Structure formats: structure tokens, C-alpha cells
């Protein structure tokens, strides 16, 4: 076989690179996110839901699709839904139950959301999109018609986890162990089951609380600060008080001192606090309780790591200290301590739960506080893509190849012969050129 000249090898390599570039499309795009408003997966008949595709980049060609329980695959604005701007408004009936997602003209997909429209009188209001570890989540057992605030039993993965007289259950700081299948029952009936997904995405900012506890007496002070990775400009401290008012530090509450917000607490300041950027990014959320009684439980406001030592203190307002205290976890007495404090030398996931304390001198009972325990992972591994059947809090989009499987196969079938013919012609041309050069030399 005759030797190819350096120029021929360069042309051959260039041809291969051009083909590879064309075959792959040369473009990487980001997936879309399906937004659901209101943010829940269960609805009563004739309630409305708004579905929209949040696309990073050009949103042209994206549409809302669904696959119902009957197996009918169709697009919004055909025999269901009404397109209003970038949203699809659906007035729901039981046959609308199914899987919804966004899809582009080239076959790219967003996350998928499962929506259920039961015929019964009870639904469970739970987040439809993934929630992030550390956030507060409230599940509500809702009844069609006039009954409200009925006692409800909440189940996770088929097991009873809590009974609430208000009809709603709050998880102050969700963790991966809270991920699962939830439902509720009451005297009015039983809801369908809904899956709640919990993500452990690294947050761009962290809310720091000093002192690190979640319960305070009235008029005590707490310092809140946003620890941001990178540029901290535009970040601010927000809260959602128990009355449902969302407001920013240095408006009608708190005083900004440098990067910290100093708050002199009163009872109406009980609520959820977090950091937020101008673009809508969030930190972890912390639940702070300001108690009017004489006893509080000093427990960590921020998650603790497995293996750490944690001390819980039953603190009394006034002069009394070191009174004998009973400590409870998830409603059950776990220990009695004459010093008024209980130490867990090395916490584990089994210690995660809802804690409170009481004392034997009738000083009172503390509110309950949730303690979150995180698992230490020394070597982070990339998160595996999963099909989401519930809500985040928005999560960062993952780069995906902007080419559907049919298009990719088509490109290979069309392009491969082209590449093969190109290579053959190049080899033949280079051989002919080499023979011509040799004849000239002779």
C-alpha cells in the first residue's frame, strides 16, 4: 500500500471532524421545566390549573403535552385545555388525570408531573414539584364543600405517621428520608396517594443563625446572615410570618448591620426565614418560634451532621435553672434529666425528629422543634437523572443533547455513507497524486 502524504492525512482528519460536528448538530441546549400553579398534584373536579413551560433560551416550538390514564397522548388546546399566552389553562375533570410535560418540536422533554383528579370528597395538598432539603413543607388534608380543619391522619408509604386536629401537617425541614408516597384520611373519606420528591441540590447561599437555635423567648435577639458562594450583591433576608406576610429585613422588622439582620423578637415574628437573591435563588429556610410561655427547648436551628455531639436544653425564663426535665421525641418520652439538658454523643438519622421538653416543677412545656440530621458524604457523586412526579423549588437544568433519537439515527444513516465516500475519494485522489509525483521524478 502506497504511503499517504501529510496533506492527505490533514484533509482526511478535517473531513472526519466536520462530519462529527454536523452529525452531532454542534449545539447543546438546556431542558425546560414544567411549572404548575397552584403547586399541587391533586385537584377536585372543576378546579383549574395553569401549566407553563419555563425554557432557558428560545421557547419557540415548546408545547404542553399529556398522557391520560386512558393512554391518550395529546397536546394542549386540542380537545383539552386553553392556551393563554405561554400558559395552558385546564378546567379539570376526572378523565384529565395523567402525566403532563413540556416537549419541543425536536423531541426534547421537561420534567413530568402527575396530576390526579379524584371523584371523592378528600384530596391531599402536597407539592407537585421537588422540594429542597431544609425547606419547610406543609401537607393539607382538604375537604370538598364546607367542612374544614377536620382531624386528619397522615400516612407515608402506607404507615400512619401523624394525626393532626387542624387537618394539616408541617415538616419544618424536609430531608431525603421524608421522600415517599403520602395520603390522608378523615371522617369525610380518603385522599389518593401522591409522591413527594426531595432533592439535595447544593444551595448557592446558606442562612446562618446566631445563637444556633429555633426557639426564643420574647424580646430576645437573634442575628441572621446570608453566607453566599460568590457575589453576595442583591441577596436579602426574607421571612414568612405565621400570619402569611412575606417581607424583607429592615422594613417593618429587623435592623440591617453590615451583612447581618439583627432581630429583637416578639411573638408575631414567629415564622420561616431565608435568604433570597434578586434572581429568585434561595438559601435553606429556618423556622423560628417566639414562645409566650416560660419554657423553651434549645435545639439546633440548622441541620447537624451524623456523628456530631448535640445537646438539647430545657430552658426556663427567669431565675430558675437546672430543673429536672423530661425530653420527648415525636410525642414519646425518651429521657428524664436532672440537669435540664440532654446530650446525644453521636447523632444518627434515627435521631431526626420533633422534640419538646417539660419539667417536673410545673414551669410549663416548650413548643416542638424539628431536628434535621444530614449524612456526611466525603466524595460527592453526580446526581442521577430521575423522572419527577412531583415539584423545587426550581432545580438547575441539566445540559441535554438537543437532538431526538430519530434525528440522531437519521443523521448517522445519511452521514455515514457520505463520510465513507469522502474517505475513499480522498485516498484515491492522494494515491493518484503520489503516482503523478513519482512519474515526474522518473
Image (cartoon, rainbow, N blue to C red):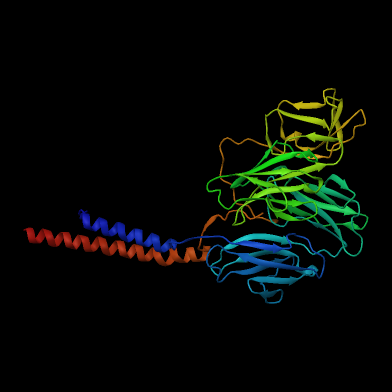
- 438 or 112, nearer to the observer: 112
Residue 321 picture quarter: top right
Residue found farthest to the top = 338
Q: Position of residue 131 (x, y in %)?
A: 69, 51
Q: Position of residue 126 (x, y in %)?
A: 77, 55
- 317 or 147, nearer to the observer: 317
Question: Which residue is at 86% across, 37% downward?
Answer: 331
Does the rendering let one see residue 289?
A: yes
Q: Is residue 345 above or below residue 377?
A: above
Residue found farthest to the bottom = 78
Residue 217 picture quarter: top right
Q: Is residue 402 left or right of residue 149?
A: left
Question: Which residue is at 16% across, 59% downward?
Answer: 434
Question: Which residue is at 44% across, 63% downward?
Answer: 25
Quadrant location of the C terminus in the rendered image: bottom left
Q: Position of residue 171 (x, y in %)?
A: 77, 46
Question: Which residue is at 17% across, 62% downward?
Answer: 433
Amino acid at each position: 500500500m502506497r504511503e499517504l502524504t501529510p496533506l492527505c492525512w490533514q484533509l482526511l482528519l478535517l473531513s472526519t471532524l466536520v462530519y462529527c460536528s454536523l452529525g452531532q448538530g454542534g449545539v447543546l441546549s438546556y431542558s425546560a421545566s414544567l411549572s404548575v400553579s397552584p403547586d399541587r398534584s391533586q385537584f377536585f373536579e372543576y378546579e383549574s390549573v395553569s401549566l407553563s413551560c419555563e425554557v432557558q433560551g428560545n421557547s419557540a416550538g415548546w408545547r404542553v403535552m399529556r398522557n391520560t390514564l386512558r393512554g391518550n397522548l395529546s397536546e394542549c388546546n386540542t380537545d383539552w385545555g386553553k392556551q393563554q399566552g405561554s400558559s395552558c389553562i385546564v378546567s379539570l375533570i376526572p378523565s384529565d388525570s395523567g402525566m403532563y410535560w413540556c416537549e419541543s418540536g425536536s423531541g426534547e422533554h421537561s420534567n413530568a408531573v402527575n396530576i390526579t383528579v379524584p371523584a371523592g370528597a378528600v384530596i391531599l395538598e402536597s407539592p407537585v414539584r421537588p422540594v429542597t432539603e431544609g425547606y419547610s413543607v406543609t401537607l393539607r388534608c382538604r375537604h370538598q364543600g364546607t367542612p374544614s380543619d377536620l382531624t386528619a391522619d397522615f400516612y407515608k408509604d402506607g404507615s400512619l405517621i401523624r394525626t393532626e386536629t387542624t387537618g394539616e401537617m408541617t415538616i419544618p425541614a424536609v430531608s431525603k428520608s421524608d421522600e415517599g408516597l403520602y395520603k390522608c384520611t378523615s371522617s369525610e373519606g380518603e385522599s389518593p396517594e401522591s409522591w413527594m420528591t426531595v432533592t439535595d441540590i447544593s444551595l448557592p447561599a446558606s442562612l446562618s443563625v446566631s445563637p444556633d437555635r429555633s426557639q426564643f423567648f420574647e424580646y430576645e435577639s437573634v442575628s441572621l446572615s446570608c453566607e453566599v458562594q460568590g457575589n453576595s450583591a442583591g441577596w436579602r433576608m426574607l421571612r414568612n410570618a405565621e400570619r402569611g406576610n412575606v417581607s424583607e429585613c429592615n422594613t417593618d422588622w429587623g435592623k440591617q448591620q453590615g451583612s447581618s439582620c439583627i432581630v429583637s423578637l416578639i411573638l408575631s415574628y414567629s415564622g420561616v426565614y431565608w435568604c433570597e437573591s434578586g434572581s429568585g435563588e434561595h438559601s435553606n429556610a429556618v423556622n423560628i418560634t417566639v414562645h409566650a410561655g416560660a419554657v423553651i427547648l434549645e435545639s439546633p436551628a440548622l441541620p447537624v451532621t451524623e456523628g456530631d455531639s448535640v445537646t438539647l436544653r430545657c430552658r426556663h425564663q427567669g431565675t430558675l435553672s437546672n430543673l429536672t426535665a423530661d425530653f420527648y421525641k415525636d410525642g414519646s418520652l425518651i429521657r428524664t434529666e436532672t440537669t435540664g439538658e440532654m446530650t446525644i454523643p453521636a447523632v444518627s438519622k434515627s435521631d431526626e425528629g420533633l422534640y419538646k421538653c417539660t419539667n417536673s416543677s410545673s414551669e410549663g412545656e416548650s413548643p416542638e422543634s424539628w431536628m434535621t440530621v444530614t449524612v456526611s458524604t466525603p466524595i460527592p457523586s453526580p446526581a442521577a437523572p430521575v423522572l419527577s412526579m412531583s415539584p423545587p423549588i426550581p432545580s438547575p437544568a441539566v445540559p441535554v443533547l438537543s437532538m431526538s433519537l430519530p434525528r440522531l439515527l437519521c443523521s448517522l444513516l445519511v452521514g455515514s455513507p457520505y463520510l465513507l465516500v469522502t474517505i475513499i475519494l480522498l485516498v484515491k485522489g492522494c494515491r493518484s497524486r503520489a503516482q503523478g509525483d513519482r512519474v515526474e521524478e522518473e
